[in-house]
Image (cartoon, helix red, strand yellow):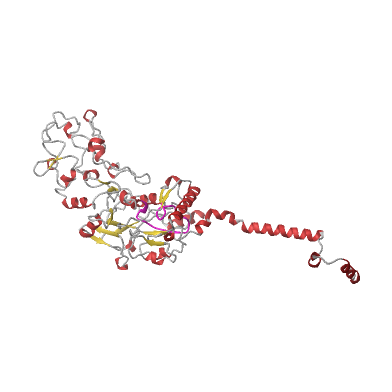
Amino acid sequence: MLYVWPSYCQEPYTEHEILPAFKILDLPKTWSDKTPVYKEPKLLFYTQEFTYKCSKCHVKDLTSKPKKSHLPFGAHKDMLFTHGLNLRCMNCHNPEHPDAFTDYDGSVIARDKPVFLCRNCHGVIYRDWRAGVHGRINGYWNNKLGPQKKIECNQCHNPHHPKFPDLKPMPPPVNPVAHKYEKDKHHE
Amino acid sequence: MSDQSRKEHDQTEPASLDDMTHEPLTRRSFLKAGAAAVALSAGTAITLSPLKDLDQHFSVNEFFQQHYEELTPEMMEKILERIKQEIKRDYDVEADLRDIKPTPGVEFAYALNLGRCIGCRRCVYACMDENNQSRDPEIQYIRVLEMEKGSMDIESSNHYYNPETVPNKGKYYMPVQCHQCRNSPCTKACPVKATWRDPDGIVVVDYNWCIGCRYCLAACPYWARRFNFATPKIASNDINTEMAYLGNRIRPRGVAEKCTFCLRRTRQGMLPACAEVCPTGSRIFANILEPGNPISYVLENKRVYVLKESLQTFPRFYYFFEK
């Protein structure tokens, strides 16, 4: 389900813009899995949805429709909205500032601080995350020796479709019984 | 020679030692002796010929190596140099081998979220890459058990599962590795003290001291120890060249090995490879002596499950799930 945006609408965030604080550490060369989780091909979050600035089309605010619809099939049709029953965009997006999130009282939450938005509903998980118990942590356990990199909510979860796709498991260990059987068959 | 003539002979010349002990050297006796000497030397050479290949598998310095606790820094330096040369000879890689000591004031612990693990086995392969296990025969430290939901019966679990995608419906996953017990049966079983608990809680093996009796494999209730039945086979580009003496250096044949919480990484402040690679973030590693560490949070706030708690091994490895 790869949706190709028209080139005139395309102005992706550069990595520098969107990930100032999120830079993932360079992984050691000996790991089998060299890709950070969110960059796996099934997670379309960064490749597809959030590489565009909302303010490109919604010039004034989010509630007013853009003057021209550049998209042939209507906007946002490529997204999956399965985040509970929460289908009201303005629960999270700030209507007045297209590139920011909204708090309970309508004040602005910066776009690179999604934790402050998500914790409004997911308080228990926020507490776990803050204690270092929820989510993947990279780097050093000892802060004195090196940096520890915690990743934030929307680096793993697609906020519109939070459930992860199922993964393909790595191959199972060699079963010695089956292995022996295969060997014997081979000898006969 | 008649008796009379012999008497005359004795009287005329004093008897030499040669005459009294040996027969006079004839052509026959010369050839006999020569053939015997040739046969003896050839036989010795054939008998001793295996010794020529011996230094590939055996070195005098290794034979006379002291126990790890008695090694001085200079002796250790020589040992590391020797092992580096052996690795260079056998696997054709330049190893950065070090003996990394535990830091005072550090005790490690591990927690694993059973509710989040999806059984993708990423940890198993990250561990193999970090710790230089043998690829053929295959040695893996972590076994991921596929368990029925609502059951804690390990006997009915399956670790050879291989579906298209995980998690399977109605199953949950429990990775098992070395629990680094505080009361460890494996170290008690060792007859030569080749394995012991270090002050930071990691149970280590000195592969040069291990005699390969496999008592520790039998003693471990978590099936955490592995034995090198054959010389490890690893492609040289798969080898992790950063090695630790008690940790992930390439093992010789005939010794026991085990998970060391990625000693090479964790004693230098890094997280273990399995914890870093986990895509669900279900693996948590910390120094439990540090205030406000995640493991203490887990023990205080979550439902914690200790595998085979009744055996009183007091593991440093905790399973937990949400309240």
**Residue A98 occupies which quadrant of the picture?**
top left
Q: Is residue A159 above or below residue B223?
A: above
Q: Nearer the viewer, residue A91 or B92?
A: B92
Q: Residue furthest bottom?
A: B3
Q: Position of residue B11 (x, y in %)?
A: 88, 69
Q: Position of residue B214 (x, y in %)?
A: 44, 63
Q: Position of residue B160 (x, y in %)?
A: 37, 56
Residue A4 drawn in magenta: no
**Residue A60 occupies which quadrant of the picture?**
top left
Q: Residue furthest left?
A: A105
Residue B258 drawn in magenta: yes
Magenta span: B244-264
Q: Nearer the viewer, residue B126 or B175?
A: B126
Name which residue lies at 80% across and 67% down. B20
Dominant secondary structure of the magenta stretch?
loop
Describe residue B10's horizontal placement relative to residue B258 as left or right: right
Q: Position of residue A48 (x, y in %)?
A: 24, 37
